[in-house]
Amino acid sequence: MVLFLTLLIAGIALVAIGVAVDGTLYLASAGVLLLIADLLCLAARSIWRSTRRPAR
Protein backbone atom coordinates (compact mmCIF):
# COMPACT_ATOMS: atom_id res chain seq x y z
CA MET A 1 0.00 0.00 0.00
CA VAL A 2 2.92 2.33 0.64
CA LEU A 3 4.15 1.74 -2.90
CA PHE A 4 0.70 2.57 -4.27
CA LEU A 5 0.50 5.83 -2.36
CA THR A 6 4.06 6.81 -3.31
CA LEU A 7 3.40 6.20 -6.99
CA LEU A 8 0.09 8.04 -6.76
CA ILE A 9 1.70 11.12 -5.22
CA ALA A 10 4.56 11.02 -7.73
CA GLY A 11 2.12 10.76 -10.64
CA ILE A 12 0.04 13.68 -9.42
CA ALA A 13 3.17 15.77 -8.86
CA LEU A 14 4.48 15.02 -12.36
CA VAL A 15 1.15 15.95 -13.93
CA ALA A 16 0.96 19.19 -11.93
CA ILE A 17 4.52 20.21 -12.83
CA GLY A 18 4.04 19.20 -16.46
CA VAL A 19 0.91 21.31 -16.79
CA ALA A 20 2.22 24.32 -14.84
CA VAL A 21 5.58 24.69 -16.58
CA ASP A 22 5.46 25.58 -20.25
CA GLY A 23 7.15 23.10 -22.59
CA THR A 24 7.21 20.11 -20.25
CA LEU A 25 4.44 18.07 -21.78
CA TYR A 26 6.58 14.95 -21.39
CA LEU A 27 6.30 15.26 -17.59
CA ALA A 28 2.54 15.44 -17.79
CA SER A 29 2.39 12.43 -20.09
CA ALA A 30 4.81 10.49 -17.86
CA GLY A 31 2.63 11.34 -14.86
CA VAL A 32 -0.51 10.13 -16.61
CA LEU A 33 1.19 6.90 -17.62
CA LEU A 34 2.37 6.43 -14.03
CA LEU A 35 -1.15 6.96 -12.71
CA ILE A 36 -2.57 4.45 -15.19
CA ALA A 37 0.08 1.88 -14.26
CA ASP A 38 -0.62 2.51 -10.58
CA LEU A 39 -4.34 1.94 -11.01
CA LEU A 40 -3.72 -1.25 -13.00
CA CYS A 41 -1.41 -2.50 -10.26
CA LEU A 42 -4.04 -1.76 -7.63
CA ALA A 43 -6.71 -3.56 -9.65
CA ALA A 44 -4.46 -6.59 -10.14
CA ARG A 45 -3.68 -6.74 -6.43
CA SER A 46 -7.34 -6.54 -5.43
CA ILE A 47 -8.34 -9.26 -7.92
CA TRP A 48 -5.45 -11.48 -6.84
CA ARG A 49 -6.28 -11.10 -3.16
CA SER A 50 -9.99 -11.70 -3.61
CA THR A 51 -9.46 -15.02 -5.40
CA ARG A 52 -7.13 -16.46 -2.77
CA ARG A 53 -9.42 -16.02 0.24
CA PRO A 54 -11.45 -19.08 1.15
CA ALA A 55 -15.24 -18.71 1.14
CA ARG A 56 -16.85 -18.63 4.55
Image: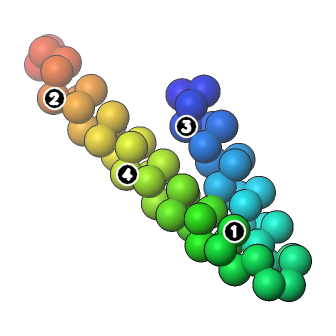
Q: Position of residue 46 (x, y in %)?
A: 32, 36
Q: Which residue is mark 1?
A: 27
> Toward which corner of the image does residue 32 lie, by quadrant?
bottom right
- Looking at marks 4 and 1 on the same chain, the residue that comes earlier in the sequence is marked by 1
Count of marks, rendered view: 4
In the rendered view, does 29 fall on the left or right side of 15?
A: left
Q: Quick one: quadrant of the N terminus?
A: top right
Q: Nearer the viewer, mark 3 or mark 1?
A: 1
User: What type is the residue that disc 3 sits on?
Assistant: Phe
**CB-based contact (under 8 Å), mark 2 and mark 3:** no
Q: How far apart in space, not on screen, are marks 2 and 3 (Cα)?
A: 20 Å
**CB-based contact (under 8 Å), mark 4 and mark 3:** no
- Looking at marks 3 and 1 on the same chain, the residue that comes earlier in the sequence is marked by 3
Q: Residue at x 82, y 67 (%)?
A: 17
Q: Secondary structure at mark 1?
A: helix
User: What type is the residue that disc 4 sits on?
Assistant: Leu
Q: Is residue 8 above or below residue 3?
A: below
In the rendered view, does 2 fall on the left or right side of 53?
A: right
Q: How far apart in space, not on screen, are marks 4 and 2 (Cα)?
A: 17 Å
Q: How far apart in space, not on screen, are marks 4 and 1 (Cα)?
A: 20 Å
- Looking at marks 2 and 3 on the same chain, the residue that comes earlier in the sequence is marked by 3
Q: Residue at x 59, y 73 (%)?
A: 29
Q: How far apart in space, not on screen, are marks 2 and 1 (Cα)?
A: 36 Å
Q: Which residue is mark 2?
A: 51
Q: Which residue is mark 3?
A: 4
Q: Position of residue 13 (x, y in %)?
A: 77, 57
Q: Position of residue 40 (x, y in %)?
A: 37, 51
- Marker disc for residue 40: 4
